[in-house]
Image (spheres, rainbow, N blue to C red):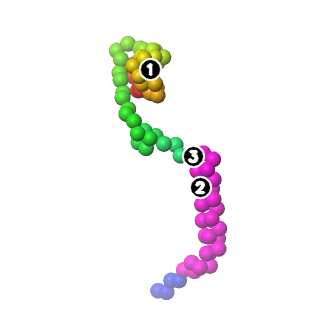
Amino acid sequence: MDIRFQFMKYRKIAAMASVALFTVSVLSLTFRGLSLGLDFSGGTLVEVTYETPVELESIRNTLIDNGYDDSQVVNFGTNLDRTN
């Protein structure tokens, strides 16, 4: 059984595809940048559950009053669950 694959026959097409993908990748990083989540940007994630619904703005104001100006308060799950 003599099987021969002609890899070099498609070298120019493969090279053009590689250059095109590389160019698209570099342009994407240039214009969109990286989206760094909590894993890469550092910080602490705190999940809090309340027995009664609480307004997000009141939580934000409480955090700001206590010196946490750059905290993020978001709704996650139901209106009883809060993540800050």
Q: Amino acid at mark 1?
A: Ile
Residue extent of the magenta highlight: 5-33
Q: Residue extending furthest bottom?
A: 2
Task: Tell me whether circle 1 and circle 3 mark residues in contact (CB < 8 Å).
Answer: no
The relative height of residue 66 versus residue 1 in the rendered view (above or below) is above
Which residue is the site of mark 2? 25
Q: Earlier in the sequence, mark 1 or mark 3?
A: 3
Q: Which mark is residue 33?
A: 3
Q: Amino acid at mark 3?
A: Gly
Marks 1, 3: nearer the viewer: 1
Task: Please identify the quarter of the rendering in which residue 39 is found.
Answer: top left
Q: Residue extending furthest front?
A: 67
What's the CA distance linking mark 1 and mark 3?
29 Å
At numbered mark 1, what does the secondary structure look like: helix, strand or loop? helix
Task: Please identify the quarter of the rendering in which residue 12 is found.
Answer: bottom right
Q: Amino acid at mark 2?
A: Ser
Residue 5 visible (yes or no): yes
| Percent coordinates x, y for residue 79 in the rendering | 43, 19
Marks 3, 2: nearer the viewer: 3
Q: Residue at x 41, y 14 (%)?
A: 53
Q: From the viewer's perspective, is 83 left or right of 23? A: left
**Number of numbered discs:** 3
Task: Tell me whether circle 3 and circle 2 mark residues in contact (CB < 8 Å).
Answer: no
Q: How dense is the environment of label 1, judged by Cα within 10 Å: few (below 14), some, or many (20 and up)?
A: few
The relative height of residue 36 versus residue 21 in the rendered view (above or below) is above
Which residue is the site of mark 1? 64
Q: Please say whether residue 9 is one of the residues in the magenta stretch.
A: yes
The relative height of residue 83 versus residue 36 in the rendered view (above or below) is above
Q: Residue at x 63, y 56 (%)?
A: 24
Residue closer to the observer: 42 or 82: 42
